[in-house]
Amino acid sequence: MPRILRINTRTKEFKFEELGEYAGLGGRALTSRLINNEVPADCHALSADNKLVWAAGILGGTGAANSGRLSCGAKSPLTGGIKESNTGGQFAQALPKLDLLSIVFEDKPEDDADFSIIEIYADKVEFKDASAIVGKDNYPAHEELKKIYGDKVVTALAGPAGEKCLAASTIQFSDPHLNPARSAGRGGMGAVMGSKKIKAVVLDPDSKGRLNVVDPDKFKVARKRWTEILLGHPVTSEGLPAYGTAVLVNIINEAGALPTKNFRYGRFDDVAEISGEKIAEVIESRNGKTKEGCHTGCVIQCSQRYNDKDGNYLTSGFEYETVWGFGANCLIKDIDDIAAMDRICDEKGIDTIEMGCALAVAMDGGVLEWGDSKSGIELLKKVGSSDAMGRILGNGADFVGQAFGVDRIPTVKGQGLPAYDPRSVKGIGVTYATTPMGGDHTAGYAVATNILKVGGDVDPLSKEGQIELSKNLQIATASIDALGLCLFVAFAVLDTEDSVQCICDLVSAAHGIEYTADDFIALGVNTLKDELDFNRKAGFTNKDDQLPRFFREEKLEPHGTVWDYTVEELQAAKV
Amino acid sequence: MPRILRINTRTKEFKFEELGEYAGLGGRALTSRLINNEVPADCHALSADNKLVWAAGILGGTGAANSGRLSCGAKSPLTGGIKESNTGGQFAQALPKLDLLSIVFEDKPEDDADFSIIEIYADKVEFKDASAIVGKDNYPAHEELKKIYGDKVVTALAGPAGEKCLAASTIQFSDPHLNPARSAGRGGMGAVMGSKKIKAVVLDPDSKGRLNVVDPDKFKVARKRWTEILLGHPVTSEGLPAYGTAVLVNIINEAGALPTKNFRYGRFDDVAEISGEKIAEVIESRNGKTKEGCHTGCVIQCSQRYNDKDGNYLTSGFEYETVWGFGANCLIKDIDDIAAMDRICDEKGIDTIEMGCALAVAMDGGVLEWGDSKSGIELLKKVGSSDAMGRILGNGADFVGQAFGVDRIPTVKGQGLPAYDPRSVKGIGVTYATTPMGGDHTAGYAVATNILKVGGDVDPLSKEGQIELSKNLQIATASIDALGLCLFVAFAVLDTEDSVQCICDLVSAAHGIEYTADDFIALGVNTLKDELDFNRKAGFTNKDDQLPRFFREEKLEPHGTVWDYTVEELQAAKV
């Protein structure tokens, strides 16, 4: 029977609880419900009132393909609203082995308290001195943890940026390849972890438990069909495995929506230097890997192992959004430098999307030249140190803008916009504007239908149909996040008739209930309602559901498009 | 006939306009109406869409006692809401001599444009190269301007902080003693000026015009009575002239409401070292001046000339709030160091209240030790340079808090709270929470009635009567600011039966109209309505009308008080 583990980070007391009012929830549905129920919306995100909640999904630990994603929730230090930051890695697979669905970190130690490593066992929690790894980058810190706990240890780390409570800091989770390369990237979850003086969390490597699947026979059938669905769609079986998510670089550039030079243009002259095809070529020439999973049980394998010029491992989880952020958005074309920047972000524990936006804003502010990757690398290395410039950069694009007097800030609700210009992919713009998460593409990935023509065909340049598209995708995404499924299953789900039924069969068989398509939809709708409710209590209004003015005033070439939605029109995208 | 001068800072075009729809307004009523009418509430405060508006009051230039205050308005880079920042100095006296009521700076030059000195004449505007003073501190910059324009020149300067567009930057106006010592301090007006690449504005020193007083005989009578009223009240005729505003140090400490160590305690052990009495003693021992006016025509004379140990001029306008901010709030007791910090703020063009809050937050963040005035001085000197730490500090308390992961941030709507702890002067807390200006004592100075027993006696520790008190004071203050009167006239006005009638007589005689007490009240009410309307459009909600949670959770000694108003209760303080 899965439980919730509550840990008081001040008193070091802990409690294993039944799910109670949270029964039936998981992943994002659980983190958002709990935050909305238990965290005062007007608290400071770094105060003792905030809670950091990690939850496996409803299908977590069942072994269903791609069901091992973890939701990290809290009030966000970056947006001031609710946040679910979704990550791969082994954590959500390992939690159920301890009969745990979720861990909730509460309260906070005194300001002068030391950082801890928190060990989680099936029946106890131990706080250990973290001084050997405090201040260390994530890879060396993870190496130290492997020395103590063995190679198979499953870890979560606050990097130097999280220790310093910077608003763009991530939590890094260990992947199947024993690297701390998977990020709960967005919204500053690392800062919440740092504020509670948690340097690392390790799960008992000797745990053997597994979630009981109530009806194994029925589950086996559904699980087989589920894998077939994922392996039967061209995006999940061909595009993503071949080139990783960076397959999008050429596609989005061709669509005229690759934000270039801090969202000034829709195409990048040097796109060939940073394309997914180019990256795959480099990876192959250096004996890297073009296909890897971010967690055990993944059948899509969109991750990669990128080696440096000497053939040594440099980075993994090197996503399209990262390539775009440091690449086109900063006019940087050296793919090795971009890969190095990705690695630094994983080392320091900072969000690559936010840093891509922040560096471009810094370039607009004259801090470094456009395209100057070497200076960009040096700046990123400062994040997490006591250096003041590192503190500015590590707090994200809005913060850099204020520090350097820049008025061109591509953020919504304080969060940097990702790799799709909303003027020429209008559906994703609706998501940016209206999701309770702040500027976020994963919350309702309308790029699928606007550009990739998955789940239908909605013209990316026209206003028609975008509101409904974004709303439906936001709901489906919230459901998928609650189930613990990887978002990329959506490509196959949108194009396969029996896919939702198959998901429902998985849940029904695993939990011994009758789960219907209506339940699936209600899961997403209720999650969004919790999130919108929290944000309202935190002071957000409809007026916060809008893109910055420059998107409305400046035409984006090559299509000459502007952002032309009113706040009132956008409200229809909210549940 | 007074006019509005509009200057386009990009095209360098200008236009002298009749008042038109703004007829009958002045000061804060004019700046707030114009901002609300003409500035898109959702624009970036540093963008071309924002406007910087300076306006003399309705009684400006008439020679009525204490009628020479200037209102500076814009969308605030600090709060994101509307701002009227009120200042002394000679500017509002000199404007009417050019037949000008107001100057509106619009649009903004390209990012790489050079800074200008803008010369204002009665019939033209000239943009001059500012390279000789760009980057210079305000005193040396003002010296350069005196060399060019003569000793009597009336100037407004964006200091190094304003040039860098920092959110706590001031505009410094020249005083009658030829120093740039008067600040439009709050809300980052210097950053708006800097964003428009204006380094300085100078008014034609040869101008001779004067506002026509329509009925000079009637005006003379009213003016005489007005002066009598001001000289007849103990606060304006005795307390303020004797010790300056720092007379409050001992009074507020005695009341248990002197915020100490970032608002942790209500009394400061070393209060005797920073009291008004002590300051007066030091000033006298060094042949300074304990009485000076901030503008010609002031009969209160609450300003001072503070000399250093060698008897040389160090600073002026050294207010209670400054003494508190760098003193009790930072546990600094060396009054010469505090005076030096005041001077640095005037040199760089940064708000002393915001810096007092920001330094204390930095102390909480471990940047410097409590009470370490020497490090504080070094940090303040960095503001306005390209140093990253200077950029952090110069953006205010919220910004410092985010940079250093501190969750104890005494701000409302992003603006640092001043020198009165709201738990033990509850009336001022109501003003902090509800004024459209953000945390601001001048917007409805309930300290008068709570502590000084002016205009009645409302127990500072009780909730009773505070909402009504604050509301009435907010209205009266908005009227006073619109008239161009110094806020300190309110002490006398509140306690003198015929004072409002006398003010109405001044307006009636000056403008040849029948001005009534109802008009006086409506002026304030309508100003507040404009401001609240702008803030609503900018996305503020009732939820923003509240103090930070720690005021509600931590008891303040010696009275053991907490802040115990709900957001709903506070709404009644708004018009």
Image: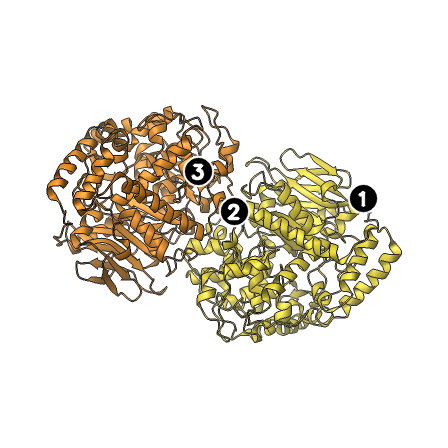
Chain colours: A yellow, B orange
Regarding mark 2 in the picture, which secondary structure is present there?
loop
**Are the residues flagged by discs 2 and 3 in contact, CB closer than 8 Å?**
no
Name the image quarter holding the C terminus of chain A.
bottom right
Q: Quadrant of residue A278?
A: bottom right
Q: Position of residue B296 (x, y in %)?
A: 17, 42
Image position, residue B448 (x, y; %): 33, 30
Q: Position of residue A387 (x, y in %)?
A: 48, 50
Q: Label 3 amino acid?
A: Ala
Q: What amino acid does circle 2 point to?
A: Gly
Left or right: B92 in relation to A232: left
Q: Which residue is mark 1?
A: A1
Chain bearing tag 1 is: A
Residue A204: quarter of image = top right
Chain of the residue where label 2 is placed in the rendered structure: A
**Numbered circles on residues, count:** 3
In this rendering, would B491 be left or right of A41?
A: left
Q: Which residue is mark 3?
A: B572
How far apart marks 1 and 3 lie (CA) works out to 51 Å
Q: Kindly identify which residue carries mark 2.
A: A539
